[in-house]
Image (spheres, grey):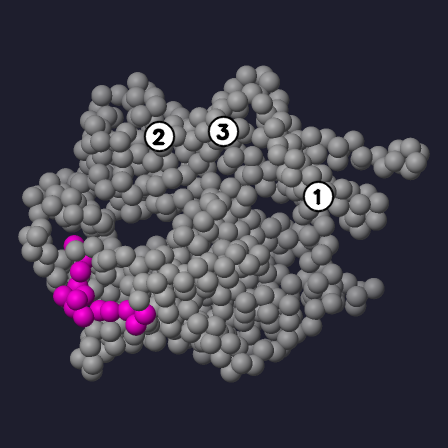
Amino acid sequence: MLDKIKKYKKLKLWIFAVFGMGVIYPTPISNDRFGQPFLNVLVNTLLVLTLFYFIEVRHLVEIRFIDYFFGLIFSILYNFTFLFIADEKPYTIMGTYYLHGAGNILITTLAILGWTITFAGALALCSFGCQKYSNYSEKSFFKFERVFLVILISWSLVIIFFLPGQISWDALKQFCEFEGKRVANLDFMYVPTNHNPWFVTLLIGSIFNIGNKILNPNFGIFLVILFQTLISAFIYTKVVQFIGQKSGKIMGIVSLVIFASPIFSSYVATIDKSTLYYAFCAAFYLCYVKIIMGVKNKHKALHTNDYLLYLLTMVLFSQFRNDALYISIISTLILLSFLVYKHVNITKLLLVLLSFVVIISGWKAYVHKINIVPGASSEALTIPTRQVSYVYINNPNSLTKKDKKIINKITPLDKIKKNYDINSGDNLKNLFPVNTFLNNPSLIKEVVQGKKKMQSNSKIKSDLREYLKVWLKAGLKHPFTYIKVYIAANSFYLNPFASPTNLYGSLFINFPTRVPYYVEPNWVDKYNYLFNDSVRLKAREFIGLILSFPVIAFFLNTAIATWFLIFLLYRSIKLRNLDMFIILVPLIGLVGLSTLVPINGYSRYVIGEIAIVLMAFACMFSVEKINIKRRGQRG
């Protein structure tokens, strides 16, 4: 027996991995670093034994340098997120204790190396599994009518309980801006802003007005719900068909289950810009990928319609979220470079890009002409604000008097500490001198009193530029502080094992409460739900049960898209496939943007990524299948 064990040369390595996985980052801070619950120890041991069996006993795969490299990336994300959120305080990261002292550094290093080995083995085995699935999977053609009907029926089981439809806080504010609502109690009148894209405000406001004129406000709300439901169902049906064709029946069914689930139906039952944003995000990515696939398939030429659809989806995608514009442009420029590299005629794509620039420029000129107030810059600066504010709170002596004076102009120094929260930047961004968020009555009062503005002037713009210089200077002095704030502020987007337990809390299925008086449209008194509160509460409990199903809960995890992206990058390198890397560009942009948002672990910021990561996997399986066929032909 001992002789059989001795022949496994890497047995000590796997034992080392088990010990490394046993390290914890206790809350509150403690020197007891090996206090893993028994169940965790058991699961970790079983995981390592499974990897040991398939890798060392069955010899299915061999762990290579690339596996260890990406294993290290996963290990760093896993360990450092837990480290920085250990005994977390609103304005102080206490977990850095586990990086101080020789003993703690040694134990933390043990954990990082142990998890690196485990993740490396898991990656090698998953890579083998992907090859096998690609080899045995066959194209599956899902009929459009059937998929469309399944999605609609599934969604209707959620929509019906919230008829005529829910309205998010953002959408209520948009309705107020659309109709120029005056809040008498605050002596404030809403004006059109681009805080939420004005294009979306015009769209939902116009559709609502049609229904309101035909019948009443309830019908207006229902008409918006119907509009976004039909468009979303159409797009997701096309996505399911694409996934089935590229990666087989199993992936097609999984994608259908995800799109038909309350992850998406809770949004189509709610008026909010995010609902159609997710759909147009998927549509844009589908058109983007089809162009790349068309280049790969030399026997099937790309048609003008492919480029026209790409232009349409690119415009719609960029109009439903302000920062989507950058993803659209960067992705298209990289796609253009890819076509040049592949010696493909770029005339049509150049015309698409030129048309896009003309359309967007024209829209911006129109918005400027009719005096739409631009969205406040604070929306894009929640991470930098948390970083420089953290330095001010915890290491004020490192900032000069001039630095503090500049910071004070943007975020008053006496208010920073009580408004600081590492997991939410909303309160800090509300300290900015310009605010279009207006999420509470006190902010509106400050605007009315002239203490805050809704639009920047030259002085505020100059102050903000100086503020960003201070942010950069402080970052050069405290790079590790900026890194730990970034990781702690995004822990739920970077580590799927650290995600909040109430995964569906940020979906629009919370028990409806009374509309706040300061975002009440003029017709709010005539807006009534079809079912009473108790029925909707029961419906919410049922939806929560569905969301707890393993497959659905897995995809709802706010860090899954990030880890899937890293895995897909790993596979593209392992496959030595440039096409696959180009396919991932929009996903890289979306994942990057999700780490710059105000709230940590908010699912609404990553659902668009879920929609396209499934297509990215389908493309990967398609590439795997082509590689397997080529190797077979050579053999």
Foreground of the two, 368 or 349: 368
What residue is disc 3 on? 27
Task: Tell me where residue 450 appears, x and y as whole percent.
Answer: 8, 43
Q: Which mark is residue 417?
A: none
Q: Secondary structure at mark 2?
A: loop
Is 319 placed above or below 75 here?
A: below
What residue is disc 1 on? 47
Observer able to see residue 284: no
Q: Pointer 1 and pointer 2: residues touching (CB < 8 Å)?
A: no
What is the three-letter code of the residue carrying label 3?
Thr
Q: For the magenta stretch, what is the residue range? A: 518-531
The alpha-carbon separation of the residues under discs 1 and 2 comes to 36 Å
What is the three-letter code of the residue carrying label 1?
Leu
What residue is disc 2 on? 91
Q: Pointer 3 and pointer 1: residues touching (CB < 8 Å)?
A: no
Foreground of the two, 202 or 446: 446
Locate residue 301 relative to residue 58 in the image: left or right: left
Look at 79% across and 66% down and name the residue there. Answer: 632
Magenta stretch containing residue 524, yes or no?
Answer: yes
In this view, the mark in front (3 or 2): 3
Q: Secondary structure at mark 1?
A: helix
Task: Tell me where residue 554 appears, x and y as whole percent.
Answer: 55, 54
